[in-house]
Image (tube, helix red, strand yellow):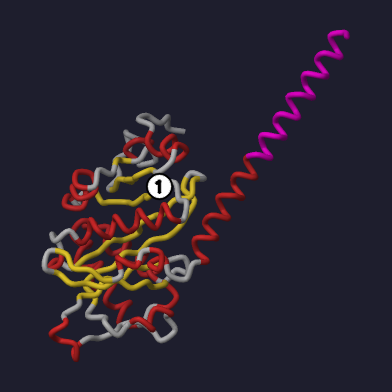
């Protein structure tokens, strides 16, 4: 076999290898998209974790309800907006005016999923209210709901081509903070993520929100993601960090490597 034939054979082998590689990449991308799609087909992610629907923690009795961005009643929208402004205007500072507009759009996005936290006071059963719309399938279990005291807004997305559960918001009223409720909600979020085969839980925290940074990094041991601006572009000052917790080797490789080269 002459050199030209050898070269042709080598080039064909390389070409075939590249085609196979592209095919594998496309297959993997499709598989990840199917995971996201499957996660969104489930009507109520709390169904897999019934013990979390109602519980008591440090003297606080609460029940959790699922919600969807397209099925929020006007009172719930107003509640979300008020709580976001109350909790986040300070950490965002001058950026809040524009960020508030963004959050209002995100709030009702078709991909927005919610866990609503209701305080339950059995001694005031006649005063219990429900703030959900009639179209919400969870209304069939509203008989024991009390007033809202917080919520989690989360989504299933592809981040760096890895399927992840992204926590957009975890907001609690000040009077129910410091009781372990936030930690329990993040525990539930992680269970939902793993149940739906997500590679990680990812979230964004304002650097000025010192209590939130301490909560996630010190109490929950979340780490600054390799995709966070401070890792990717260390010379560029950004007002936020991206934090994560990974559940498999692929996600660990993408999100936990200590150094990333800026492009």
Which region shows up in magenta? 1-24
**Tally of numbered discs:** 1
Please indicate whether residue 17 sits to the left or right of residue 104 in the image.
right
* Residue 59 percent across, percent down from the top left: 11, 68
Q: Extreme front residue here?
A: 51
- In the picture, which quadrant includes the N terminus? top right
- Residue 39, image x and y in percent? 49, 60
Position of 197 relative to 66 (above/below): above
Q: Position of residue 99 (x, y in %)?
A: 32, 61
Instruction: Return the residue found at the far top.
Output: 2
Q: As drawn, is 161 to the left or to the right of 215?
A: right
- Residue 106 at least partly seen: no
Q: Is residue 210 left or right of residue 21?
A: left
- Above-or-below relation of 18 to 27: above
Q: Please, what secondary structure does the residue beneath circle 1 have? A: strand
Q: Is residue 221 above or below residue 104?
A: above
Q: Which residue is mark 1?
A: 200
The answer to whether one can see residue 180 in this image is: yes
Which sits in the foreground, 142 or 110? 142
Residue 16 occupies which quadrant of the picture? top right
Q: Residue at x 67, y 37 (%)?
A: 22
Which residue shows up at 27% across the image and 58% down it?
A: 95
Residue 14 within the magenta-colored segment of the rendering = yes
What secondary structure characterizes most of the magenta part? helix
The quarter of the picture where residue 236 lies is top left
Task: Write down the quadrant of residue 238 in the picture.
Answer: top left
Compared to 235, does 85 lie above or below? below
* Residue at 40% over, 31% down: 260
Coordinates of residue 5 in the picture (x, y in percent): 86, 14
């Amino acid at each position: 076999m002459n050199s030209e034939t050898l070269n042709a054979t080598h080039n064909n082998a390389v070409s075939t290898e590249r085609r196979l590689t592209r095919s594998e990449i496309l297959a993997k991308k499709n598989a990840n998209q199917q995971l996201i799609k499957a996660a969104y087909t489930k009507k109520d992610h709390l169904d897999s974790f019934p013990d979390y629907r109602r519980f008591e923690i440090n003297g606080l009795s609460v029940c959790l309800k699922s919600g969807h961005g397209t099925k929020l009643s006007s009172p719930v929208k107003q509640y979300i907006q008020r709580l976001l402004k109350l909790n986040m205007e300070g950490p965002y500072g001058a950026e809040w005016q524009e960020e508030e507009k963004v959050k209002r759009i995100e709030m009702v996005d078709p991909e927005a999923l919610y866990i609503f936290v209701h305080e339950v006071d059995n001694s005031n059963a006649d005063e219990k209210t429900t703030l959900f719309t009639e179209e919400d399938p969870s209304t069939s279990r509203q008989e024991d709901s009390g007033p809202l005291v917080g919520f989690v807004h989360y989504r299933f997305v592809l981040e760096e081509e890895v399927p992840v559960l992204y926590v957009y918001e975890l907001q609690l009223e000040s009077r129910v903070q410091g009781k372990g409720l936030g930690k329990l909600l993040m525990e539930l979020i992680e269970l939902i993520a793993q149940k739906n085969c997500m590679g990680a839980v990812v979230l964004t925290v304002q650097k000025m929100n010192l209590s939130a940074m301490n909560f996630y990094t010190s109490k929950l041991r979340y780490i600054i993601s390799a995709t966070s601006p401070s890792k990717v572009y260390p010379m560029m000052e950004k007002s936020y960090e991206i934090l994560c917790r990974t559940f498999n080797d692929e996600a660990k490789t993408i999100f936990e490597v200590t150094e990333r080269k800026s492009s």
